[in-house]
Image (cartoon, rainbow, N blue to C red):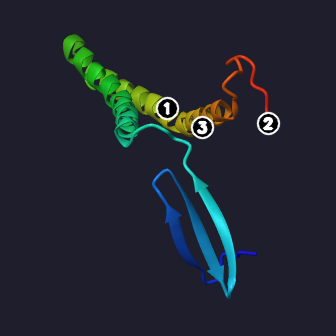
Amino acid sequence: MLTASDPMRFAVRGGSSAGVAVCGIDGEREAIVIDDQDSRSSLSVGLDWSARVTTIGLEFCVPAVLGHVVDRWLSTAPWLTVLGALLGMAIGMLHVLRLPGELARADERAKAGARRKPGDSPSRNVPD
């Protein structure tokens, strides 16, 4: 059995989509299969992450900028700017905190789609 305190040697075999890591501890060998389910290209994954980061950045900045513009128009500085900054921080942090849940749900949908047989309808998801 592998434990965190044991010295380990890893050898990874396989391509970029799947590989096998073989661990050796004092003569024992144990294989760990690493299987990547994401069939999208790395450009597609990169564009998806850049869109997420840009959206979160804009959620932080835009309310503060709008508050500043309205402050200058109504001569109420700095109150609407501060209110916009607080609102932007709340919206941005809410999105950041929801992101892991969204990623987990997307991963579950991808795994459910991989388990589905070619003749199955999308509405009927029968486990193996």
Tell me the distance, in whole angstroms, between the alpha carbons under discs 3 and 2: 18 Å
Residue 95 is marked as 1
Residue 128 is marked as 2
Which residue lies at the image location 79% right of the left edge and 27% below the top edge? Answer: 126
User: Which amino acid type is shown beneath numbered disc 3?
Assistant: Asp
- In the image, is 62 to the left or to the right of 14? left
User: Is label 3 or label 2 in front?
Assistant: 2
Q: Secondary structure at mark 2?
A: loop
Q: Position of residue 44 (x, y in %)?
A: 38, 35
Q: Are marks 1 and 3 in contact (CB under 8 Å)?
A: no
Q: How many marks?
A: 3
Q: Secondary structure at mark 1?
A: helix
Q: Which residue is mark 3?
A: 107
Tell me the distance, in whole angstroms, between the alpha carbons under discs 1 and 3: 18 Å
Mark 2, other Cα within 10 Å: few <14 / some 14–19 / many ≥20: few
Residue 83 is marked as none
Mark 3, other Cα within 10 Å: few <14 / some 14–19 / many ≥20: some
Q: Position of residue 48 (x, y in %)?
A: 40, 34
Q: Position of residue 15 (x, y in %)?
A: 47, 57
Compare residues 72 and 104 and report the one nearer the observer: 104
As displayed, is residue 71 above or below residue 115? above
- In the image, is 50 to the left or to the right of 15? left
- Locate residue 20: give its quadrant: bottom right
Compare residues 59 and 85 and report the one nearer the observer: 59
- In the image, is 1 to the left or to the right of 47? right
User: Which amino acid type is shown beneath numbered disc 1?
Assistant: His
Which corner quadrant holds the N terminus? bottom right
User: Is label 2 or label 1 in front?
Assistant: 2
Tell me the distance, in whole angstroms, between the alpha carbons under discs 2 and 1: 35 Å
As displayed, is residue 33 above or below residue 67? below
User: Is label 1 or label 3 in front?
Assistant: 3
User: Which amino acid type is shown beneath numbered disc 2?
Assistant: Asp
